[in-house]
Image (cartoon, rainbow, N blue to C red):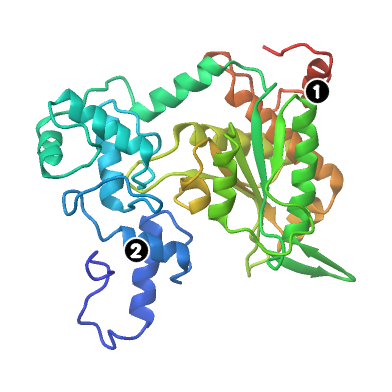
């Protein structure tokens, strides 16, 4: 597969072994697909490799049940349909119901049988026609309009908060004298505080796990939970770790690929979360980044993963273990979510929203505009 993608020469020595050449090729592939770059072929990397084999037009695409077709050819088709003004949702490389309906709509408009299957005749029609949408990225236009029409209030919205790891997976673990700090415990505490703040603002909040989870829930299941609840926002909380104790700071991730495909509202939310946390906590700004992790790719709502700091950094750790600091992080996230629903022309400066006032106003029964 790597050789087919021109990432690995099939004539390298010991081509049947996972050697240094193979590891470098895997890292290059992971980097190009927005995955975690560790040189290991785990389940997520293997799925991406398998999907990368397909080019648009090489096979007939259709909505399969219960396991839908996936691949780079599906993503290319979705991007093409988005450019032409058809609503496939996010270009997530999954040939689901929404994509099938968009194909059927296109077929109906060009005089083909609207069966929702992309075969040779549909491909020929797609090649003949140009893009229809003007004035910006089609998905950005559609998602921005949906946010604007939903109004600025948080009351009645559903937000899924995902404390990372849990159960048999503690995440980053750091001994500190007689204490032992674990990522799973700290982010669950952070998620519980965030749940309380959001609930006080009139939000329906669902956590993906409790503190006593026995097994770590896969990212795919966390994404499916958020989708099944029809969530408006998905926020995953993590702490980072590195062998170098000097590594420190906060970073926020949203869905995106190297060819410019992105979740428009997820990207905006990531920027707001990042700026609010940096302004309110003083953590080093490690920026926002686009990633194609399953957790971000499979969620159908604005989704971000926040690495709140490095537990392996003495500087970050001293703050992360302080409950008052975690409260400031929570306030930053709540402010960022509120700002996402403000119209761009009515946005407010970073750090200016008083979350306690938002809570008091909402508690009094008044909708904040």
Q: Check disc 1 and report its element: helix, strand or loop.
A: helix
Q: Please state if 188 lies on the left or on the right of 101 as rendered.
A: right
Establish if 154 lies above or below 297: above
Q: Residue at x 19, y 30 (%)?
A: 107
Could you tell me which quadrant the N terminus lies in?
bottom left
Q: Can I make out residue 356 in this image?
A: yes
> For residue 226, what is the image quadrant?
top right
Could you tell me which quadrant the C terminus lies in?
top right
Q: Check disc 2 and report its element: helix, strand or loop.
A: helix
Q: Where is mark 1, residue-wise?
A: 359
> For residue 326, what is the image quadrant?
top right
How crowded pointer 2 is (Cα within 10 Å; few <14, some 14-19, many 20+) is rated as many
Who is closer to the viewer here, 178 or 164?
A: 164
Who is closer to the viewer here, 344 or 41?
A: 41
In x, y percent, where is residue 184? 73, 59
Q: Please state if 54 lies on the left or on the right of 148 as rendered.
A: left
Q: Earlier in the sequence, mark 2 or mark 1?
A: 2
In x, y percent, where is residue 364? 84, 14
How crowded pointer 1 is (Cα within 10 Å; few <14, some 14-19, many 20+) is rated as some
Disc on res. 49: 2
Q: Residue at x 42, y 64 (%)?
A: 45
Disc on res. 230: none
In x, y percent, where is residue 46? 40, 66
Q: Residue at x 22, y 41 (%)?
A: 117
In x, y percent, where is residue 165? 67, 59
Q: Residue at x 87, y 71 (%)?
A: 177
């Amino acid at each position: 597969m790597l050789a087919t993608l021109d990432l690995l020469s099939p004539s390298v020595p010991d081509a049947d072994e996972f050697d240094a050449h193979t590891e470098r090729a895997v890292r290059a592939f992971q980097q190009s697909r927005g995955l975690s770059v560790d040189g290991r072929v785990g389940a997520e990397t293997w799925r991406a490799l398998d999907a990368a084999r397909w080019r648009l037009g090489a096979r007939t695409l259709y909505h399969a049940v219960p396991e839908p077709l996936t691949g780079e050819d599906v993503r290319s088709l979705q991007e093409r349909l988005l450019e032409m003004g058809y609503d496939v949702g996010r270009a997530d490389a999954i040939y689901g119901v929404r994509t099938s309906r968009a194909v059927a709509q296109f077929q109906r408009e060009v005089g083909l049988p609207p069966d929702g299957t992309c075969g040779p005749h549909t491909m020929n029609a797609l090649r003949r026609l140009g893009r229809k949408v003007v004035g910006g990225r089609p998905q950005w236009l559609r998602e921005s309009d949906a946010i604007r029409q939903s109004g600025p209030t948080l009351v009645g919205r559903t937000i899924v908060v995902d404390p990372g790891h849990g159960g048999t997976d503690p995440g980053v673990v750091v001994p500190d004298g007689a204490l032992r700090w674990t990522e799973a415990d700290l982010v669950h505490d952070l998620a519980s505080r965030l749940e309380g703040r959001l609930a006080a603002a009139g939000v329906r909040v669902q956590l993906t796990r409790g503190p006593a989870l026995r097994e770590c829930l896969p990212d795919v299941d966390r994404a499916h939970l958020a989708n099944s609840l029809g969530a408006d926002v998905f926020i995953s909380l993590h702490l980072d770790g590195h062998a170098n104790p000097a590594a420190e700071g906060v970073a926020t991730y949203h869905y995106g690929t190297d060819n410019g495909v992105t979740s428009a509202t997820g990207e905006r939310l990531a920027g707001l979360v990042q700026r609010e946390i940096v302004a309110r906590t003083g953590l080093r700004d490690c920026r926002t980044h686009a990633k194609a992790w399953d957790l971000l790719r499979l969620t159908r709502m604005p989704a971000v993963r926040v690495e709140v700091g490095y537990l392996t950094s003495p500087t970050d750790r001293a703050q992360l273990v302080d409950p008052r600091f975690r409260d400031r992080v929570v306030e930053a996230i709540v402010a960022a979510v509120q700002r996402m629903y403000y119209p761009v022309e009515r946005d407010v400066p970073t750090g200016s929203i008083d979350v306690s006032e938002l809570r008091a106003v909402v508690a009094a029964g008044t909708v904040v505009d």
